[in-house]
Amino acid sequence: MNHLLLLLAAIVLDRVVGDPPWLWQRVPHPVVIFGKAIDLFEKRLNRTSLTAEGRRLNGVFTIVALLAGSAVFGMLLSALFGKLGLLGIILELIVVAVFLAQKSLGDHVQAVADGLLRDGIDAGRQAVAMIVGRDPKTLDEAGVSRAAIESLSENFADGVVAPAFWYAIAGLPGILAYKMLNTADSMIGHKNERFLQFGWASARLDDLANWPAARLSAGFIALATVLKRGAGAGRRSLSAALRDSGLHRSPNSGWPEAAMAGALDLQLAGPRVYGGTRVSEPMMHASGRSDAGPADILAGIGVFYRACSVMAGLIALIWAISKII
């Protein structure tokens, strides 16, 4: 079975089923296993007694070893599934779906809107604290709403588009290696005293691995906006991505966030507080509205799901062309 067709099936499965809590309460999620492997390396190789150069070299060794191990395991799985016929196809479909995050991301962001609508700002803050790193106590309703939309946009790129991209490019070795890298970046890629040197290689490689997906995600959001909100909104989305993506501190996150800001005609990013420290950044799509609310979160979710469908449509088109050529 062509792996692009299998990817399409995995996208549909993830959209319908997502990450069932009953399953992951009984068995560890693969990302949890990745995290334990990363933690094992970090505790042994990121000792404070080492020099900065030694910690950086150990960090390079760590991520290279983890990526190599993930890719080799992916190759073994691929070879095994290839010998199991229909059962192997089903197993690979499940593995790929597990590493996509459409429904789980949409559900988490939906919970923020539901909390605001049902129980007010405290419930909204509690829900948004599950998906963002900023201090929720500093956020009013507009801040909670913008934070949810920003998380939705950023995670569309690295939680949906990037895994699909790397599976399309390199099969199971590609998607497993990408998820290991992305997990490592989230755990050790921080610019603080503990991880600045040890996580340097993981952070740089994660930026590189997400470069294509970030730009693709902006295009998917713009196309989805055309379908969902009209051609004018779609042009505004694409224009905001091209104009304002560089205003974000991340070389990648600004692309989907700026595209979503334009899609909703809403200001995103700007000054934020993380762990008591204020981060000052320019607003993306500064000409947009500042009064974000639950309705904007719901509108963003609608664009997000349509963007996932646009991505699936592109994959289907590439598969069809590959069969004709």
Image (spheres, grey):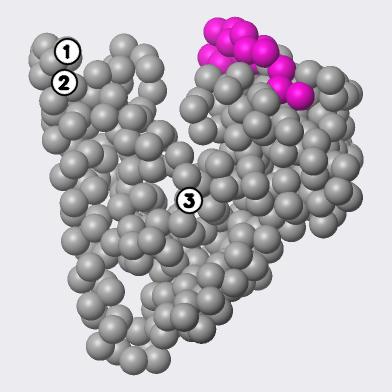
Question: Are the residues flagged by discs 1 and 2 in contact, CB closer than 8 Å?
Answer: yes
Q: Is residue 103 visible?
A: no
Left or right: residue 273 versus residue 71 is right
The kind of residue tagged 1 is Ala
The kind of residue tagged 2 is Arg
Question: Residue 162: which numbered mark, if any?
Answer: 3
Residue 258: x, y in percent? Answer: 68, 31
Left or right: residue 316 versus residue 212 is right
The kind of residue tagged 3 is Ala
Identity of the residue drawn at 34% across and 92% down: 85
Residue 74, above or below 109: below
Q: Give the CA distance from mark 1 to mark 3.
A: 31 Å
Question: Residue 55: which numbered mark, if any?
Answer: 2
Q: Which residues are magenta?
A: 271-285
Q: Give the class, few, some or many, for how many residues have Cα within 10 Å of label 2's Cα (few <14, many ≥20).
A: many
Residue 184, above or below 243: below
Question: Residue 52: which numbered mark, if any?
Answer: 1
Q: Give the CA distance from mark 1 to mark 2.
A: 5 Å
Q: Give the CA distance from mark 3 to mark 2.
A: 29 Å
Who is closer to the viewer here, 14 or 71? 71
Who is closer to the viewer here, 46 or 182? 182
Q: Residue furthest bottom?
A: 85
Who is closer to the viewer here, 267 or 180? 267
Left or right: residue 11 versus residue 266 is left
Residue 266: x, y in percent? Answer: 82, 29
Identity of the residue drawn at 18% across and 51% down: 68
Identity of the residue drawn at 14% across and 28% down: 58
Q: Is residue 68 visible?
A: yes
Q: Secondary structure at mark 3?
A: helix
